[in-house]
Amino acid sequence: MTGPPEIKSAFNAIRAIDYTIILVRDSTAMRGFYENVLGFPIARELSQGWIEYRIGANTLALAQPKRLASDQLTPRGAASLQLAFKAGRNDVDRCAAELTSKGVALMEPPTDQPFGHRTLFFRDPDGNLLEVYAEI
């Protein structure tokens, strides 16, 4: 009788990404963007340097870097991450219209991609690449 397959790494036991932290350059602008432009409600605020938003089953946190004093911020003009937010097909276009009405420049308007997604790309105030997509 054979037992369960052997786990090759302790990291194979991880089942989900629990939260994502964006290390922010301009916490005031970033907070305003995620709350007022994207409309994400605050889940909790542990300090001025740590704010959490609940998005579906995940937590997105904005944090001022301080864990490692030697860490350098990503230079302006270079994205440090890309976040992809899943939505319904019609919601991609609604999000684009809402962003445009709030003065947010779109990097790419809603586009049907050959790999089966409808995508919308834009940036947050720190230059991170954000995507809203739907499966089509």
Image (spheres, rainbow, N blue to C red):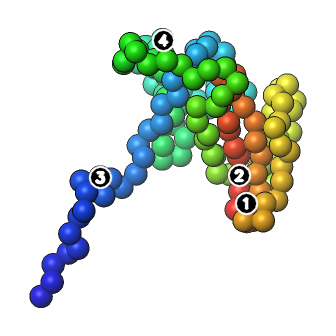
How far apart marks 1 and 4 lie (CA) works out to 37 Å
Q: Earlier in the sequence, mark 4 or mark 3?
A: 3
In the depicted structure, whether residue 12 falls above or below residue 74 = below
Q: Which element is circle 1 on?
A: strand
Q: Is 115 above or below relative to 99?
A: below
Give the amino acid at mark 1: His
Q: Is residue 96 left or right of residue 15?
A: right
* Residue 40 vertical position relative to residue 29 in the rendered view, above or below: below
Based on the displayed image, in which of its 4 quarters is residue 99 positioned?
top right
Residue 131 drawn at (x, y percent): 69, 43
Alpha carbon separation for disc pair 2 and 4: 31 Å
**Residue 67 occupies quadrant:** top left
Residue beneath disc 3 = 11
The amino acid at mark 3 is: Phe
Q: Earlier in the sequence, mark 2 or mark 1?
A: 1
Q: Are marks 2 and 1 in contact (CB under 8 Å)?
A: yes
In the image, which is nearer the foreground, mark 3 or mark 1?
Answer: 3
Of residues 8 and 87, the one nearer the viewer is 8
Residue at label 4?
Answer: 48
For the N terminus, the image quarter is bottom left
Q: Of label 3 and label 1, which has the lower sequence position?
A: 3
Label whose residue precedes the other's in the sequence (1 or 4): 4
Q: Residue at x 83, y 49 (%)?
A: 110
Q: Which residue is mark 2?
A: 133
Pick whichever of labels 3 and 2 is earlier in the sequence. 3
Residue lying at 44% horizontally and 38% vertically, measured from the top left:
19
Q: Is residue 18 visible?
A: yes
